[in-house]
């Protein structure tokens, strides 16, 4: 049995309570994919019954994960066969390893082509399910939001790179990617019929400032993982941050899944993190994810690190965007661009 958590605890609290003993970063990322709350409400009518939720035999899986933590060589070797810097591909590899261990993986990344060799689409996963196959599409998504919750709120969750919205992404998944099994060209690739096509959606949603909203938008799961977002100028003003924690950790893209833990030398104080972010935004406009870290005895040195703690763990996370992000979002004419209001 997994420990119970209260409804007031954050995604970080939940993860640390259940899996705080794990240290291998790939095992932690895999655990998060299996155990993190779903991003979307599986029962919301707008998703047409096409949102999957993993059914897991936790006693067996927990034993396997603990064994994997003690000896992660097989997982590391599998990930090393096709190294990637793309978070989506990394997550797919982790789930492929899990489905393979369960013995239900029929195919992964199976491309469907027409006779003329044009690519029609790709099955993320084909899994054994009774007499047929489950076609499962995986999406790990991170969106920023500021509008009030509403029936069409999915259009107001915008990707940090301004390239897509949650609404647009879900339309593509529901009406294009999940329809692949019905395409005539797919029949030649399927060893047996697909009985069900669903999408597994994991990720984090980021809200404007603190405190985070108690209400959630239509179609979003009540317990989804969430953080906040702010501009570089606002991050520099420490009083904008909700937490008195003096420890901050930059999370590179492949570390966006599970709540972070870090050694002493990896954690910066507020001044050092502000300088790090300013140097980044001086040459690059890509938003950055920063974890707010806490630990027993965590104290600022007033220099570039913190003292008096062997390790720290994430208590909250923040997407920091460049100061012109709002203006560029408007210029890109995204439907999800928020109607900014004065603070």
Image (tube, rainbow, N blue to C red):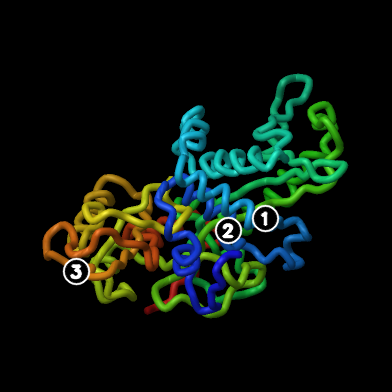
Please say whether residue 337 is visible from this viewpoint.
no
- Could you classify mark 2 by the number of other residues whose Cα lies within 10 Å: few (under 14), some (14-19), or many (20 or more)? some
Q: Position of residue 34 (x, y in %)?
A: 59, 54
Give the CA distance from mark 2 to mark 1: 9 Å
Q: Taking 41 as reference, is 19 left or right?
A: left
Which x, y percent locates residue 308? 18, 65
For the residues marked 2 and 3, what is the alpha-carbon distance in whole angstroms?
32 Å
Q: Earlier in the sequence, mark 2 or mark 1?
A: 2
Which residue is disc 3 drawn over? 299
Q: Is residue 67 above or below residue 144?
A: above
Tally of numbered tags = 3
Q: Quadrant of the C terminus?
A: bottom left
Dot 1: what SS?
A: loop
Residue found 63% across the figure and 47% down from its top: 138
Task: Indicate which disc residue 56 carries.
Answer: 1
Q: CA distance from mark 3 to mark 1?
A: 40 Å
Q: Nearer the viewer, residue 298 or 151?
A: 298
Identify the residue position indicated by label 2 in the image.
35
Q: Quadrant of residue 85?
A: top left
């Amino acid at each position: 049995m997994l420990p119970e958590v209260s409804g007031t605890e954050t995604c970080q609290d939940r993860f640390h309570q259940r899996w705080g003993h794990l240290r291998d970063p790939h095992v932690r990322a895999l655990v998060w994919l299996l155990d993190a709350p779903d991003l979307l409400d599986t029962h919301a009518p707008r998703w047409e019954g096409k949102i999957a939720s993993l059914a897991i035999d936790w006693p067996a899986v927990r034993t396997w994960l603990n064994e994997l933590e003690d000896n992660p060589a097989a997982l590391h070797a599998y990930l090393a066969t096709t190294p990637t810097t793309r978070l989506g591909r990394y997550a797919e590899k982790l789930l492929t390893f899990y489905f393979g261990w369960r013995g239900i993986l029929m195919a992964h990344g199976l491309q469907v082509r027409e006779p003329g060799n044009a690519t029609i689409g790709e099955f993320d996963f084909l899994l054994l399910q009774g007499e047929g196959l489950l076609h499962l599409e995986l999406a790990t998504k991170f969106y920023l939001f500021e509008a009030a919750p509403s029936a069409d709120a999915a259009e107001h969750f915008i990707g940090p790179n301004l390239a897509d919205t949650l609404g647009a992404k879900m339309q593509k998944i529901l009406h294009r990617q999940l329809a692949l099994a019905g395409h005539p060209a797919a029949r030649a690739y399927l060893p047996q019929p697909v009985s069900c096509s669903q999408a597994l959606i994991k990720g984090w949603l980021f809200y404007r400032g603190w405190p985070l909203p108690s209400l959630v938008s239509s179609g979003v799961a009540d317990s989804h993982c969430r953080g906040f977002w702010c501009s570089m100028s606002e991050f520099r003003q420490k009083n904008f941050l909700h937490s008195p924690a003096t420890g901050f950790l930059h999370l590179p893209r492949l570390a966006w899944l599970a709540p972070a833990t870090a050694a002493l030398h990896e954690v910066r104080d507020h001044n050092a993190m502000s300088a790090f972010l300013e140097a980044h935004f001086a040459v690059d406009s890509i938003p950055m994810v920063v974890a707010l870290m806490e630990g027993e005895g965590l104290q600022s040195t007033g220099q570039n690190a913190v003292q008096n703690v062997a390790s720290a763990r994430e208590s909250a996370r923040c997407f920091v965007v460049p100061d012109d992000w709002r203006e560029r979002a408007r210029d890109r004419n995204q439907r999800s661009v928020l109607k900014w209001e004065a603070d």
